[in-house]
């Protein structure tokens, strides 16, 4: 039984997964109230599935890129549960969660999160064996700079405004735009990635697990 928590941005999610099905999931938009909303949401997800903390076997948390406050709240809760219940922790990059949900239609993918100040955090992926593999570094870009980089057929998914969607949609030859529903960062996909890593024994040390905070003027690690 694995509990997954994602507080990277204002889109917050919690999911409970047992390796064969998602037992409970909650996704909502927070107005920067992560601190007061997260713990009750975790309790509700567990209660709906009739699961206690003592039944959990592993924890997963999104590590960013994302906001300082959001990531800090999510990691603090997961690390606290890990220490209290002696549970392994798996940290998963937030953009990988977006990419996991996308079917492979072309060979290139751009996954996007809000970076503040009108900028976008963009992670680049290439298709490999019907799965997306990250390539290069995450970039923080304004929309026009992103548009200029879309010089070949590219799937685009993530946190985009209506105007940004219209702008990118004009590049019909090179942009395969995911729908808003397909662009929702669901914690159940975070749980699936973490489950595979857990089964492979690739757990993280809670003491050293660190988030990737957004930087506005330079690339950040992916």
Image (cartoon, grey):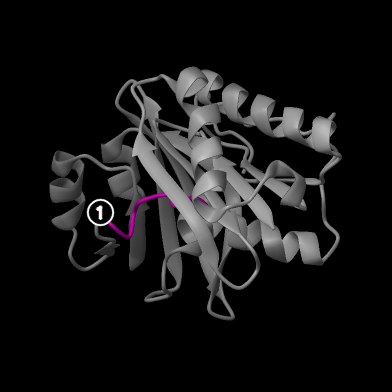
The quadrant of the picture occupied by the C terminus is: top right
Residue at screen point 43% across, 51% down = 111
Q: Is residue 99 visible?
A: yes
Residue 39 is covered by the magenta coloring: no
Report the span colored magenta: 180-187
Residue at screen point 33% across, 20% down = 117
Residue 185 is covered by the magenta coloring: yes
Residue at screen point 43% across, 75% down = 104
Residue at screen point 64% across, 38% down = 221
Depth check, front residue: 150 or 86 = 86
- Would you name the residue on which mark 1 appears? 180
Q: Please, which residue is most extreme toward the bottom here?
A: 129
Q: How many marks?
A: 1
Residue 42 spot, x, y in % from top left: 55, 38
Residue 68 spot, x, y in % from top left: 55, 20
Q: With respect to residue 139, does 90 lie above or below? A: below
Q: Is residue 96 visible?
A: no
Q: With respect to residue 148, does 1 lie above or below? A: below
Instruction: Decide if residue 211 is on the left or right side of residue 144.
Output: right
């Amino acid at each position: 039984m694995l509990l997954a928590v994602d507080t990277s941005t204002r889109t917050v999610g919690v999911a409970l997964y047992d390796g064969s099905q998602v037992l409970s999931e909650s996704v909502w938009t927070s107005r920067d109230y992560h601190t007061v909303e997260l713990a009750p949401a975790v309790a509700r997800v567990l209660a709906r599935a009739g699961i206690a903390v003592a039944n959990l076997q592993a924890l997963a948390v999104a590590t960013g890129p994302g906001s300082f406050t959001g990531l800090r709240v999510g990691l603090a809760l997961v690390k606290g549960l890990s220490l209290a219940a002696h549970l392994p922790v798996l940290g998963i990059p937030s953009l990988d969660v977006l990419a996991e949900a996308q079917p492979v239609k072309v060979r290139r993918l751009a996954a996007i999160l809000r970076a503040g100040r009108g900028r976008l955090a963009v992670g680049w992926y290439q298709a490999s064996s019907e799965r997306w593999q990250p390539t290069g570094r995450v970039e923080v870009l304004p929309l026009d700079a992103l548009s200029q980089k879309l010089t070949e057929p590219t799937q685009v998914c993530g946190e985009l405004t209506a105007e940004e969607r219209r702008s990118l949609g004009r590049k019909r030859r090179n942009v395969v735009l995911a729908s808003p529903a397909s662009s929702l960062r669901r914690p159940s996909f975070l749980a699936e990635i973490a489950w595979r890593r857990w089964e492979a024994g690739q757990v993280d040390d809670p003491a050293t697990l660190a988030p990737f905070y957004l930087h506005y003027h330079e690339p950040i690690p992916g």
